Amino acid sequence: MRWLFALVGLLLIALVAYYRRWLEAQTIRVSSESYIVQTALGQVEYDLRGSGPVVLHFHGGNVGHNGWFTLEHLIHAGFTLLTPDRPGYLGTPLADNGSPEAQADLAAALLDKLNINNVAVVGVSAGGPAALQFALRHPQRTKALVLLSAITQRTPLSHDQLDSTLGKLVMTPQFQNPAYFLINQAMKRLPALALQDYVRTETTYDMKTGKRYIEQILDDPQQRRQVMALADAIVPALPRFAGVMNDLRVQESLDDLPLDQTRAPTLIVHSRYDGDVPYENATHAHAKIPRSELITVDQFGHMVWWGDPTVTKDFQARIEEFIRSHVNLT
């Protein structure tokens, strides 16, 4: 039996060595294409891609500026995509900028630094409150507002986020990088299996329906590439931990927003089968925001951009046309 224990020991040593090399590589990669500037309200790390009118992207939870790929279609449609790390993510310190109001003002300070006068704004998931506050606090700079699977009202955390073993594991600082290393490896090596966890946490589908969507996602080269991009966009996890925890505090304590005071033309895109940010967030915003438009897309739950590629292309084209109709392209 000694040889077995020795073999197990060697395998563990090899795994630890691989993990350390992986973590070092991911730490270098994560900011290899980004920029860091000092604004009047603090340091901001950001990603900037494309050319044309600027779309300010308030990213969702767990990602950061690496989540730009969610809106890659806007780059191809002739827009510049600006994705700053929200406070607590990567190179943007949390400091006193955790509230949606402060996040919005910090983004405005970044626009000042970059000499950008006005933008279209897209808020994705946990980036919704900050996007809404930007439109409310900086109406003269907001040409259009798009809410994509976005939080728009107080949204209590689920049992999985609060009480499950996995939920507690990924909310513990010392386990952040190892836990997300395992998630990253599963998504890269066993994507069909890994996406079944997303069915449970990000959708309200039964597993049979979820597996049908998984087949569509992995059969489409563009969506498969985005699954791989997401796997890399969530690691290393520890430098995002302060931001993730702040997002959870915000969604649980969010005060009623004066949505009826929103002046920007607003497009809301959401799934009825969103298991992370319930559909009521979309209907709530649609009822409150004057002249808003709601597109209901029954795709892969919270990951509304995944599923039937023809459906995705259709609503993405509608987003592009909506922004284009309110932003001067000349």
Image: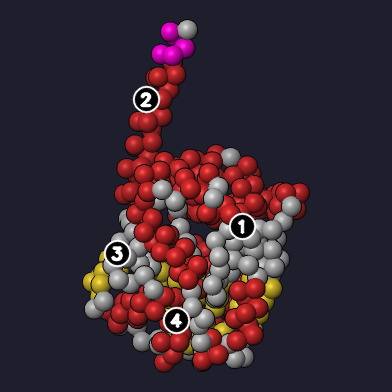
Magenta residue span: 2-6
| Comparing labels 2 and 4, the label whose residue is closer to the camera | 4
Q: Residue 286 location in percent, x, y?
A: 63, 83
Q: Determine which residue is flagged by label 1.
A: 202
Please tell me whether residue 194 is drawn above or below residue 290 in the rendered image.
Answer: above
Amino acid type at circle 4 is Gln
Q: Are marks 1 and 2 in contact (CB under 8 Å)?
A: no
| Gap in angstroms between the C-alphas marked 1 and 2 | 35 Å
Of marks 4 and 3, which one's residue comes earlier in the chain?
A: 3
Q: Residue at x 25, y 72 (%)?
A: 42
Horizontal and vertical percent for residue 98? 36, 70
In the rendered view, does 158 fall on the left or right side of 299? left
At horizontal 40% and vertical 43% (from top left) the residue drawn is 175
Residue 93's disc is 3
The residue that mark 2 highlights is 13
**Contact? badges 4 and 3 (CB < 8 Å):** no
Cα distance in 3D space between marks 1 and 3: 28 Å
Mark 4 = which residue? Answer: 133
